[in-house]
Amino acid sequence: MSLKKFFGHLHTINHHRRLVRKYCFKLGLIHQGLWHDISKYSFTEFWPGVKYYQGFRSPNERERDDKGYSKAWLHHKGRNKHHFEYWYDYVASVNAYRPVKMPIKYVKEMFCDRLAASKTYLKDKYNDSSALEYFSSHKARDKMHEETGQLIESWLIMLSEKGEKETFEYIKKVKEY
């Protein structure tokens, strides 16, 4: 492990969390902004992050390349409700696990997270379409509850077309489904 990777990863986490905190605060999500991604400092997530740090994408992606899965991601998604993967449950009527609808406050945090991640990893290559492009390229909507997927995609489209200011003003007014 090099000090460059250690401090690079720490800086990335801190930068990302600062942005998410700023965005959550804009939406009135004070508690969520303060506690966002705190699990990234845990041993299970932090040290693989250092080992697989590259600076231009999530270390979880590099860990998957190396091991075929990411132990850090499995830990992370199970503890952070702003990830749609957290919201899978057993549905008895179909005898299978399915995505369930996310509460609005976590969809809002997911929006903040996606915006901050795009800015953190893309740096000066970021534009207001970046989060939507990433979302679309990974077919994330197909893996979410239909209403949750429609909602987050509509906000990312709005960001792409109308910019941050107008999108945040709109999202702040959104209550429950």
Image (tube, rainbow, N blue to C red):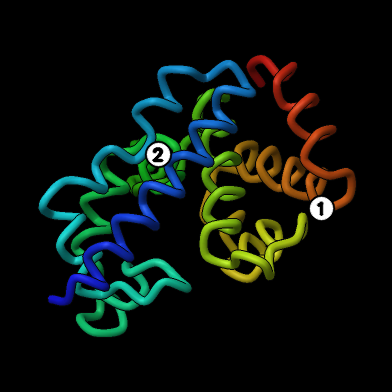
First-in-chain label (1 vs 2): 2
Indicate whether 25 appears above or below 126: above
3D distance between C-alphas at marks 1 and 2: 26 Å
Q: Quadrant of residue 93?
A: top left
Amino acid type, label 2: Trp
Name the one closer to the observer, 98 or 26. 26
Q: Residue at x 69, y 38 (%)?
A: 151
Q: Quadrant of residue 152?
A: top right
Percent of width and height locating residue 52: 26, 75
Which residue does the numbered mark 1 point to in the structure image?
160
Percent of width and height locating residue 6: 22, 65
In the picture, measured across the screen, residue 134 lies left or right of residue 127, that is left
In the picture, measured across the screen, residue 62 lies left or right of residue 39, that is right
Other residues around mark 2 within 10 Å, as few (<14) / some (14–19) / many (≥20): some
Q: Residue at x 70, y 20 (%)?
A: 172
Q: Which mark is residue 87?
A: 2
